Image (cartoon, rainbow, N blue to C red):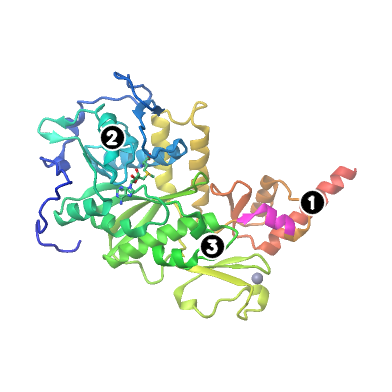
């Protein structure tokens, strides 16, 4: 961590600093507010615009709130709870908290020792305080939660300058506002978790390369797997900011949701720089043959597609630099699955969508799978046949010795190391077989 003079800034007039060092709350001090994951908390007053999520009632007032982001919140809560279990403490900053639903869930479900719920819009304050008031504000002399209404960067910078770090920071921002990344990394403890967001589908789609370059340092061009590129652009942006500060970032999971769209990534931040060229490079897509490849920095200027006899090819579309490593840690997702099962969020017919998502993430983590995915529509169009069933294509690829998995990002696509030419051959063979069966 960079060395800073202790308390060089006077406290902000807007920022209410916790009176106590709730940093070091012990696990025995969190029993004031008991919660069962399957129970509902009773409402004791009339709410103006109330909602329920995972059994918790809360008011959204006039704040920005999306019901569709519930899965992203579930994943954050599970990750924070795992952190709390492994480290024995959890101090959260919900930096752009809206109505405070995440803060409430981190307190109740993840059993955070302390949550700072911040939103720049002070008109949200009443509703945030009302929602968090379901949890006792203090435990003895220690504060459990606090509401501030400041610019998130100011809050994070002030806490960093006080060397008062967080274990977990949730940055639920709009668009491709990457200005939050560096202050967030600064305000995080070593080995802490950073949960970041982008909602900029235009940039990930390659329609605003100057914007993606300005925000994440990546020149992004249109590619068929643009929503995976959106996640890689965001991870790459964090990796770059972390590296400036002498840290490296490891993605634990990456989640794309088409509502919005929303790109969310959970990263662990540690000391050390990105290894030479490792997992941070360029991605190409060949418009002529449909193949994609990842390139390292040392291959700059030598990018070509095998379909063009290794000569520099005009058909090659290149984006980067981006994260070209794994999108998730399979072990980490397995831990999330175990916890979700313990909490009865999945299993016994519950939470089929969440379980399916997590299992797809595990499958996507296979280290043999390259960047991107192949859309079945593209295979069908290149093969000039109707698309065979995705499951048939996958099992034929696996039979032929390739790795193949569904993608949580695109339902009609396969992540595979099977080259496009081979996909086309399999699709044509399958269609011929199906045709033959239909004739007989
Ligand atoms: C996507 S909404 C948050 C939604 C909330 N996290 C949830 O899960 O329901 C983004 C919030 O950021 C707040 N905001 C915008 N710019 C901000 C800034 N610079 N600092 C802090 N909050 C900001 C907005 O007022 C808005 O409530
Ligand atoms: Zn090619």
> Disc 1 designates what residue?
431
Name the spot of residue 356 as percent of width and height, x first: 53, 39
Q: Is residue 391 visible?
A: yes
Q: Distance from label 1 to label 2 (Cα)?
A: 57 Å
Tag 1, which secondary structure?
helix
User: Around disc 1, counting alpha carbons within 10 Å, would you say few (fewer than 14), some (14 to 19), or many (20 or more)?
Assistant: some
The residue carrying mark 3 has its beta carbon less than 8 Å from ligand 1: no
Residue picked out by circle 3 = 207
Residue occupied by mark 2: 128
Which is the main secondary structure of the residues drawn in magenta? Answer: helix
- Image position of 294 (left or right of 108): right
Please tell me whether residue 219 belongs to the stretch shown in magenta: no
Q: Quadrant of residue 6?
A: bottom left
Which of the marked residues, 3 or 2, is nearer the chain's N terminus? 2
Vertical position of residue 95 compared to residue 419: above or below: above
Mark 1 or mark 2: which is in front? Answer: 2
Residue at disc 2, CB closer than 8 Å to ligand 1: no
Q: Residue at x 48, y 37 (%)?
A: 354
- CB of mark 3 within 8 Å of CB of mark 2? no
Work out whether mark 1 precedes mark 2 in sequence or the reverse, and give the earlier one.
2
Among the two numbered marks 1 and 3 on one chain, the one whose residue lies closer to the N terminus: 3
């Amino acid at each position: 961590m960079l060395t800073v003079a202790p308390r060089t800034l006077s406290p902000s007039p807007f920022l209410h600093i916790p009176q106590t060092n709730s940093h070091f709350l012990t696990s025995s001090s969190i029993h004031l507010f008991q919660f069962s994951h399957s129970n509902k908390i009773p409402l004791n007053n009339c709410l103006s615009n109330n909602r329920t999520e995972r059994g918790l009632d809360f008011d959204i007032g006039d704040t920005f709130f999306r019901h569709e982001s519930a899965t992203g919140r579930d994943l954050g809560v599970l990750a924070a709870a795992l952190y709390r279990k492994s480290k024995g403490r959890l101090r959260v900053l919900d930096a752009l908290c809206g109505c405070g639903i995440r803060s409430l869930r981190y307190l109740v479900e993840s059993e955070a020792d302390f949550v700072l719920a911040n939103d720049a819009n002070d008109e949200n304050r009443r509703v945030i305080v009302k929602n968090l008031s379901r949890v006792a504000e203090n435990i003895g002399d220690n504060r459990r939660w606090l509401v501030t209404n400041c610019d998130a960067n100011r809050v994070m910078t002030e806490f960093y300058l006080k060397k008062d770090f967080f274990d977990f920071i949730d940055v639920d921002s709009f668009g491709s506002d990457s200005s939050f990344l560096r202050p967030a990394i600064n305000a995080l403890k070593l080995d802490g978790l950073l949960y970041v967001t982008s909602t900029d589908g235009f940039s990930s789609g390659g329609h605003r390369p100057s914007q993606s370059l300005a925000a994440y340092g990546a020149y992004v061009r249109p590619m068929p797997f643009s929503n995976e590129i959106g996640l890689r652009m965001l991870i790459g942006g964090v990796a770059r900011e972390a590296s400036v500060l002498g840290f490296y970032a490891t993605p634990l999971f990456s989640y794309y949701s088409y509502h919005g769209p929303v790109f969310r990534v959970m990263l662990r931040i540690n000391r050390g720089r990105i290894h030479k060229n490792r997992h941070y490079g360029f991605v190409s897509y060949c418009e002529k043959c449909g193949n994609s490849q990842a390139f390292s920095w040392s291959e700059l200027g030598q990018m070509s597609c095998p379909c063009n006899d290794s000569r520099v090819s005009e058909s090659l579309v290149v984006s980067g630099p981006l994260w070209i490593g794994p999108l998730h840690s399979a072990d980490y997702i397995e831990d999330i699955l175990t916890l979700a099962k313990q909490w009865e969020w999945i299993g016994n017919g519950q939470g089929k969508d969440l379980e399916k998502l997590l299992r797809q993430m595990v499958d996507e983590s296979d280290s043999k799978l390259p960047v991107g995915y192949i859309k079945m529509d593209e295979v069908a169009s290149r093969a000039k046949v109707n698309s065979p069933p995705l499951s048939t294509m996958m099992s034929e690829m696996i039979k032929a010795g390739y790795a193949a998995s569904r993608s949580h990002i695109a339902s009609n696509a396969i992540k595979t190391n099977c080259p496009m030419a081979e996909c086309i051959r399999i699709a044509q063979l399958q269609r011929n077989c199906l045709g033959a069966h239909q004739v007989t």
